[in-house]
């Protein structure tokens, strides 16, 4: 039998068949990137402080309700470190857009890097923000406020006051999406940029130097996007769990027991009834100011 002639049509047919097999096998597809370990609220303990973070009990818009996004997987626990230099100090943890070198989740900062202590307030601005500002002013204390973008417009005067009185601003996303690390880079950028735009609408030219992932659920992607927008990711290493309403004395005891040189203390001025937090700081501030230098996180 004479050999069968291989025509051009036969070659094309074979090529198309092989391409179909490759597609069926997933050749050339891309696997999802590993998001890395993140802080799991309530399951781990940071060095020098308490584990924990914000949970659904006090979430502002958690899960992006109404956005059509499926809920993401819960974050995996990790261990936070300590003694991370703050921006502007010797051994800086990196510059915006650079590689973070903090010892918290995904390279976020967990200490000020000096003997000074930073008080930070999350989930505002809200009804309790102005009274907390009044209290801080009474003791001549500067703090760092991590703002929810969608709440800024209603409290624009309060945000302007923060800047005028020398407090540091921190981006806490548009609507407190605790699953932010499961979103696309485009969605993460939108969350952060919308918040910065809202703050700048209230205070043109305000320096927004920091980003705090809701729940402390940092991922390499959220830290990287924040860096591209000029922000350093800010964790904490003392959590008095004021978000869980443990009572004024419990908040006081936790802060006093776990705050030491270089601590970053997590508290809340928004996200619910913060009367216990306000009352606790009326007791705490005289002692804290006698034991430590209290500072806002540096913006340069």
Image: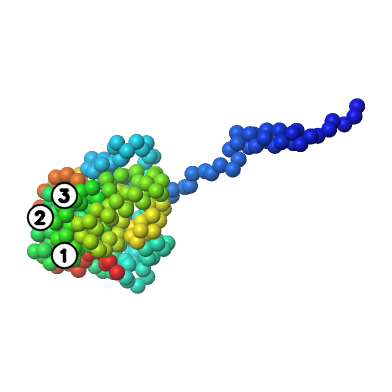
Find the distance from the CA under tag 2 to the CA under tag 1.
Answer: 16 Å
The residue wearing badge 2 is 131
Which of discs 2 and 1 lies nearer the camera? The answer is 1
Q: Is residue 157 left or right of residue 98?
A: left
Number of numbered labels in the structure image: 3
Question: Which tag, 2 or 1, sits closer to the chain's start?
Answer: 2
CA gap, disc 3 and disc 2: 16 Å
Quadrant of image for the N terminus:
top right
**Residue ID at (53%, 44%):** 30
Circle 1 is placed at which residue position?
A: 164
Q: Tag 2, which secondary structure?
A: helix
Compared to 233, does 22 lie above or below?
Answer: above
Q: Which mark is residue 154?
A: 3
The C terminus lies in quadrant? bottom left
Res. 297 image quadrant = bottom left
Task: Answer with mark 3 or mark 1, whichever residue precedes in sequence.
Answer: 3
- N-terminal of the two: label 3 or label 2? 2
How far across and how far down the image is residue 257, in percent? 21, 57
């Amino acid at each position: 039998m004479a050999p069968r002639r291989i025509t051009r049509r036969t070659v094309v047919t074979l090529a198309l068949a092989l391409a179909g097999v490759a597609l069926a096998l997933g050749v050339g597809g891309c696997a999802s990137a590993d998001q890395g370990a993140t802080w799991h609220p309530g399951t781990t303990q940071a060095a020098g402080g308490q584990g924990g973070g914000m949970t659904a009990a006090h979430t502002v818009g958690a899960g992006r309700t109404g956005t059509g996004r499926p809920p993401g997987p819960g974050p995996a626990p990790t261990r936070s470190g300590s003694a991370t230099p703050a921006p502007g100090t010797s051994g800086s943890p990196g510059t915006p857009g650079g590689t973070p070198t903090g010892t918290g989740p995904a390279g976020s900062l967990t200490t000020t890097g000096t003997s000074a202590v930073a008080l930070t307030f999350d989930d505002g601005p809200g009804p309790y923000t102005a009274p907390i500002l009044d209290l801080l002013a009474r003791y001549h204390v500067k703090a760092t406020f991590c703002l929810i973008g969608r709440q800024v417009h209603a409290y624009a005067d309060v945000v302007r006051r923060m800047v005028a009185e020398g407090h540091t601003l921190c981006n806490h996303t548009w609507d407190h999406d605790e699953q932010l690390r499961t979103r696309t880079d485009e969605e993460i950028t939108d969350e952060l940029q919308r918040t910065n735009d809202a703050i700048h609408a209230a205070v043109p030219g305000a320096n927004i130097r920091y980003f705090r992932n809701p729940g402390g659920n940092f991922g390499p992607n959220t830290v990287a996007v924040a860096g591209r927008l000029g922000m350093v990711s800010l964790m904490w290493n003392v959590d008095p769990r004021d978000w869980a309403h443990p009572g004024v004395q419990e908040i006081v005891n936790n802060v006093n027991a776990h705050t030491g040189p270089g601590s970053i203390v997590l508290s809340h001025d928004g996200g619910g009834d913060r009367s216990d937090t306000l009352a606790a700081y009326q007791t705490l501030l005289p002692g804290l100011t006698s034991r430590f230098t209290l500072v806002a996180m540096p913006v340069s």
